[in-house]
């Protein structure tokens, strides 16, 4: 059996409330891909009301709009896209760093097998 490291990264505001993590990342990516909050909810198998509520809560916590809704559907605002991209880059960097540290710190344990 080999060992593996797992980590989870999320961003909170000053009050400790979730701003963005893996779940909200998936919601924003789905809205960006599908151009619809309703279709995003369907794709993620979540009730529309739950997706809408998470978006609204995050907007309130951030202090800016994430999603614009028009007669044609929904799309991420410039700020929403920036939040999505910044979080994605942060998560990717953290995962790479954790993998490097894990390999360095646990390589002796792996050799004991």
Image: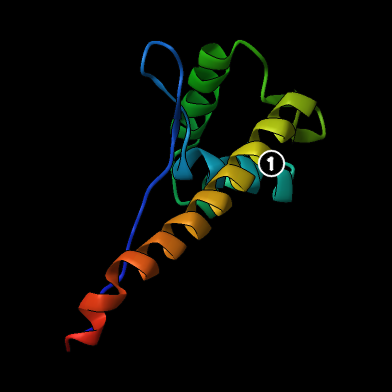
**Disc 1 designates what residue?**
85
Q: Quadrant of the N terminus?
A: bottom left
Residue closest to the eye, 12 or 106: 106
Whole-percent x and y of residue 8? Answer: 38, 47
Q: Would residue 100 appear left or right of 64 to someone viewing this image? A: left
Residue 41, position in %: x, y? 53, 44
Q: Is residue 2 above or below residue 6?
A: below
* Residue 90 quadrant: top right
Measured as percent of width and height from the top left, residue 42 is found at: 53, 49
Residue at 59% x, 39% y is 87
Callout 1 crowding tier (Cα within 10 Å): few <14, some 14–19, many ≥20: some
Residue visible at 50% across and 34% down?
Answer: 51
Q: Is residue 2 left or right of residue 38?
A: left
Q: Is residue 2 visible?
A: no
In the rendered image of this protein, does residue 12 appear above or below residue 10?
above
Mark 1 lies on a secondary structure that is helix
């Amino acid at each position: 059996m080999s060992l593996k490291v797992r980590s989870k990264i999320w961003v909170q505001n000053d009050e400790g409330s979730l701003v963005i993590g893996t779940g909200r990342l998936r919601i924003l990516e789905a809205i960006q891909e599908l151009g619809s909050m309703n279709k995003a909810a369907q794709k993620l198998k979540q009730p529309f009301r739950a997706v809408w509520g998470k978006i609204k809560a995050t907007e309130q916590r951030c202090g800016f709009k994430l999603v614009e809704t028009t007669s044609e559907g929904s799309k991420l605002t410039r700020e929403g896209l920036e939040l999505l991209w910044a979080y994605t880059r942060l998560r990717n960097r953290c995962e790479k760093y954790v993998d490097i540290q894990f390999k360095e710190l646990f390589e002796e344990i792996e050799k004991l097998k």
